[in-house]
Amino acid sequence: MSQIEDLQGRIAAALDRIGQGVDRMGDGAAAGGGAAPGALEAVQQELEDERIANEQLQERVKKLQIRRQRLEEELQSARDTIAESIAKFDGDLQGLRDANEKLREINARLREANEAGVGDAELINRGMEAEIEGLRATRAADRAEAEIIYTDLNEAVENVRLSRQAEE
């Protein structure tokens, strides 16, 4: 991007120098300096061609800057979406870890109760509740993971669509 701006500045400076030279040649021809009229017209045509090229470069730079800004905004939006998805996924995974820890504790108590020959209905109920909670947490973690994948796929499809539009 800076190379284009450097070139643009150099072209503008060259155009100014050419314009000044043309003015001097015109003043010299008017004063009888005898500059060839064909040479003056050729220099003026070159000057006009350079001005047109400069305007085209300036327009191209503007378009590239707009495109770069749009891509940066889309990238930031994608980053924000991914960060939200990851935070949700991390919360779901923490819930899964907590549920699994509770399930391990209750299962250890159930084993102890069975070894002692005492079947405790409350422990069995708590074990089932912990297992159900673990299944829910697993389901939430799976859903969050699927949402992350879905977001990544949508972003990839959108990038392909944008690149095809840019090529056209």
Image (cartoon, helix red, strand yellow):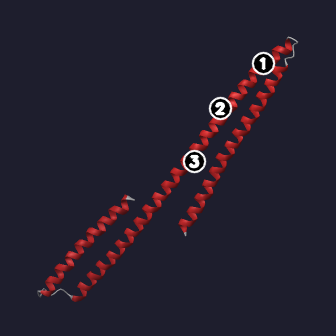
Q: Residues within 10 Å of mark 2 (few under 14, many from 20)?
A: some
Q: Which image quadrant is residue 123 in? A: top right
| Left or right of 135, for residue 92 | left
| Left or right of 48, for residue 154 | right
| Left or right of 55, for residue 131 | right
Q: Which residue is mark 1?
A: 108
**Earlier residue among tags 3 and 2:** 3
Q: Position of residue 55 (x, y in %)?
A: 36, 72
| Left or right of 92, for residue 46 | left
Outermost residue on the front side: it is 122
Residue 81 — which label?
A: 3
Looking at the rendered image, the quarter that the N terminus falls into is bottom left
Work out whether residue 36 or residue 131 is closer to the camera in this orientation and state it.
131
Q: Residue type at mark 2?
A: Gln
Q: Residue type at mark 3?
A: Thr
Q: Position of residue 22 (x, y in %)?
A: 21, 79
**Earlier residue among tags 1 and 3:** 3
Q: Which residue is mark 2?
A: 94
The answer to whether the residues at label 1 and label 3 have Cβ atoms under 8 Å apart is: no
Q: Residues within 10 Å of mark 3 (few under 14, many from 20)?
A: some
The answer to whether the residues at label 3 and label 2 have Cβ atoms under 8 Å apart is: no
Q: Residues within 10 Å of mark 1 (few under 14, many from 20)?
A: few
Q: Which image quadrant is residue 100 in? A: top right
Outermost residue on the left side: it is 31
Work out whether residue 2 or residue 92 is closer to the camera in this orientation and state it.
92
Q: Secondary structure at mark 2?
A: helix
Q: Position of residue 133 (x, y in %)?
A: 75, 32
Q: Which image quadrant is residue 165 in? A: bottom right
Residue drawn at (24%, 72%), measured in percent from left and top?
A: 16
Instruction: Examine the rendered structure and indicate whether residue 16 appears above or below residue 87.
Output: below
Q: How far apart in space, not on screen, are marks 1 and 3 (Cα)?
A: 41 Å
